[in-house]
Structures are given as C-alpha cells and as structure tokens.
Amino acid sequence: MQDPLMSQGYDIWTPTLRIARPTDSIEALLPFYVDGLGFQVLTRFNDHEGFSGVILGHPGQAYHLAFTHHRGHKAGRAPSADNLLVLYLPQRLAYQAAIGAMVEIGFKPVPSNNPYWDQYGKTFEDPDGYRVVLTNQSWDR
C-alpha cells in the first residue's frame, strides 16, 4: 500500500535533522565549525525570549547544527569525552583537506576516548569540550 502523503509529493521519511545544544559562547565555536569544518552560517537569532543562537549547515542539505545561549544560564562543558559528532569523508583528498583546515587554524587532534576512532580517523575537541571525529570511511548501510 502506498503512503498517501508520498503520492501527493511529500517525502515524510527524509526529515531535516537539526542537532541543537547549548553553549556559553557562540562566538568561540564559530572558528571551529565554520573556519575549520567548513559549515556555513545559515541564520542567526538574538534574544528570542532570552535565547540567542546560530544555525550552521550547508545550503540545501537536510542537516543543521544549532548552538544556543540562554541568557543568565550556564551551559558548561561536554559531560564526557564520548559526546561525538562523526563526519564520514570517504574521499581521501576531502578527508586530508578537512584535517589540514582544522590544524591550520590551530585545532590539533586529540586522543579519542574510543580507540576505534584513533584507528579510523582524527578527533578534534571544540571550545566546549564536545568532539568531532573526521573519518575516512563511507557509511553505506
């Protein structure tokens, strides 16, 4: 049986994914995610009922990162070294370029909490202690 929404042109199985988390300093995160990892600032908002934020991503892609600051509240650092965002970069040159960009702006790889990621990629820690793994693998499952 065909889904009635899909027959009308709606694809309910391909949502836009937004990963949102708080931070104490949006501006401190921008060099890491924009200059290093190549995300673009898609939009910003300021003091929306006490919240300010930035949405990062790539135009036309179905995923975003949102970083928010709630005035008067402390977000603190990542709760563990295993809070990961994993970016699969199957093309070797793209993987090497991504690592090079991070190192060039001053972010050095850190040892991963899970040795799997040291074997298959490089881990970088953002100013809030959250980690991003760049891996030279594809995800085709």
Image (cartoon, rainbow, N blue to C red):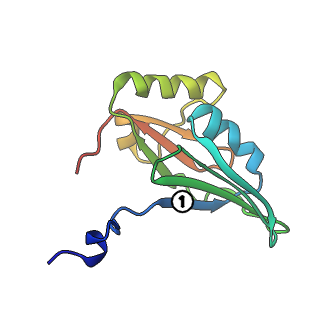
Residue toward you, 5 or 82: 5
The front one of 123 and 21 is: 21
Q: Quadrant of residue 23?
A: bottom right
Give the residue furthest to the right: 72
- In the rendered image, residue 113, in percent from the top left (x then y), is placed at 47, 47
User: Where is residue 27 shown, x and y percent of the image?
Assistant: 77, 45
Query: Amino acid under label 1?
Result: Ile
Q: Quick check: 59 above or below 52? A: above
SS of the residue at dot 1?
A: strand
Image point (85%, 68%), residue name: 72
- Above/below status of 113 relative to 118: below
Near-viewer residue (48 or 71): 48
Where, by quadrant of the figure, is residue 137 drawn? Answer: top left
Please identify the quadrant where the N terminus is shown.
bottom left
Is 57 drawn above or below residue 94 in the view shown? below
Q: Is 22 left or right of 82, judged from the image as shown?
A: right
Image x and y of residue 16, in percent:
46, 60
Residue 15: quarter of image: bottom left
Of residue 85 and residue 37, the one placed in the foreground of this image is: 37
**Which residue matches tag 1?**
19
Q: Position of residue 22 (x, y in %)?
A: 68, 61
Q: Is residue 73 left or right of residue 11?
A: right
Q: Which residue is found at the position 77% from the left and 51% from the top?
A: 25
Q: Residue at x 62, y 21 (%)?
A: 104
Is 111 on the left-hand or right-hand side of 6? Answer: right
